[in-house]
Amino acid sequence: MESVNFIEDIINEELAEGKVTTVHTRFPPEPNGYLHIGHAKSLCLNFGTAEKYGGMCNLFFDDTNPSKEKTEYVEAIKADIEWLGFKWYEVHYASDFFDVIYEKAVKLIKDGKAFVCDLSAEEISATRGTLTEPGKESPYRNRTVEENLALFEGMKEGKYSDGEKVLRAKIDMASPNINMRDPVIYRVLRATHHRTGDKWCIYPMYDFAHPICDSCQGVTHSLCTLEFEDHRPLYNWVVENTGVEHKPRQIEFARLNITNTVMSKRYLKKLVEEKFVNGWDDPRMPTLTGLRNRGVPAQSLKNFCEAIGISKANSEIEIGYFEHFIRDYLNIHAERAMAVEKPLKVVITDFSGSEEEDFDVNPNDETAGTRKITMSKELYIEEDDFSLDPPPKYYRLKKDGYVRLKNAYIIKCDEVVFGENGEIKELRCSHVPSSRSGNDTSGIKVKGVIHWVNAATCVDAEIRKYDYLLKDAQYPGQDFSERMNTNSVHVFYGKAEPYLAGAKDGSSFQLMRKGYYKKVNDNGRLILSEIVSLKDTFNVKK
């Protein structure tokens, strides 16, 4: 099968050599928070690779740290995967295999390859050495097998407090890879587990549980991000020394980093807890539930992940590149509509009654057809589409100037009416009867076309626009609060055509000349929530 990345090169080679007959991957989130856009790359890779090769992909929850894990997060992760259209083969949890993992730890002790250590976490860290200096062996490293078995059993039975004792693999304190210097593989941790309750008071470390769980599931290719590359020798050591029958292979790839985006569950959780945002599904959040709530199409996210590809080199993708794929999808699939966020009243003095105009539902969809919009004497246009002192090459409405109303007539501003405080109250205009859109015989050439809504039939609309949570593109690791945009939501109380009020809740629209918006019905109140702006600075080759 033709490969598109180095991981598929490896798989193709193994299939050709007969080392693998069926590709089996797994997506392994820890249920300690909601998935964010960075997880989408791994999610699409694991599920997509299995799909391509006619294999299987498990949903595997790494629940080895009960102090931070919740069933709420488990259900949210499942919903995110279903939203993206993927189907898992089986659902497994690390906790499904706690008995097996414990048995493998006992086997290491019996084989003289693990020992119970009384050093504290700080003492272990201090004796681990550096990249240029070897570590120092624990004074408890040479305990007998019998003593280690008894102590480990005591850990399991709850005889020791948290941190009082740990089980460490006995490997090599002089290894150039610090991860191989007698790593901790079990610790005492009294915390109620979201699935096993208080059955266990000892829990395996991720590096120990990970390869054993992969083996138990029959995983052939354990796809991890690059931070696990230095852990691969330990992964392989566990596979080779615990006697597992099935031997999976770990392969690392570069994680996804995006400018102006908080890409850390820890920081995202802090945003939620400190109420900087309105929950994990806030439309500004880069969580998958936040993107879904914002109205981002699932397919656009999958298209983005496919386009950025898989590599071994870390890089940072501009947020605008992701937004391009959202626009690209919505440009084809979203209906068009009109709304004004800062209404300015226009009175067409020589127009009487009302008239229906044809409006293209979606010019990029030949089957979409047209619908009727009503024009009458009084309209609303955008306040920003009129200027008393226009700059050069200003093609919108100005005093004594002409502009075309979208799908309607050319109008001319004859008079500006001011309010008591000097603000523009309304514009009095005339229209060119022979300039009707689609049948223009006026001979008047105008470069400007503006959107509008009919004053008699329009509805009130709350229009929400969003900025990035991070003020700048760079995020070198400081606390997020140093770079947070404290003014990332902008609310306008405008007017919208009545068609939007009757549209299905959650529908996506391109508001002409404004951007792509999601329709929200809040107890009869129309809310138009921005998905992405119209501006696209990326020219992606098709």
Image: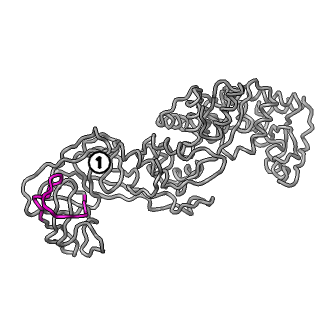
Image quarter of the N terminus:
top right
Q: Residue at left 14%, top 58%?
A: 435
Q: Is residue 5 left or right of residue 159?
A: left
Dot 1: few (<14), some (14–19), or many (≥20) neighbours within 10 Å? some
- x, y percentage for residue 503? 27, 41
What residue would you read off at disc 1? Answer: 336
Mark 1 residue element: strand
Q: Magenta includes 442?
A: yes
Vertical comparison of 474 with 231: above or below: below
Does residue 184 appear in this view? yes
Q: Of residues 206 and 235, which is closer to you in this image? A: 235
Looking at the image, which is closer to me, 400 or 375?
A: 400
248 above or below 36?
above
Looking at the picture, which amino acid does disc 1 mark? Answer: Arg
In the displayed structure, would residue 100 be above or below residue 259? above
Q: Which residues are magenta?
A: 430-450
| Residue at horizontal 23 percent and vertical 45 percent from the top | 499
Q: Would you say 168 lies left or right of 384 here?
A: right
Query: Where is 65 relative to 105, above or below?
Result: below
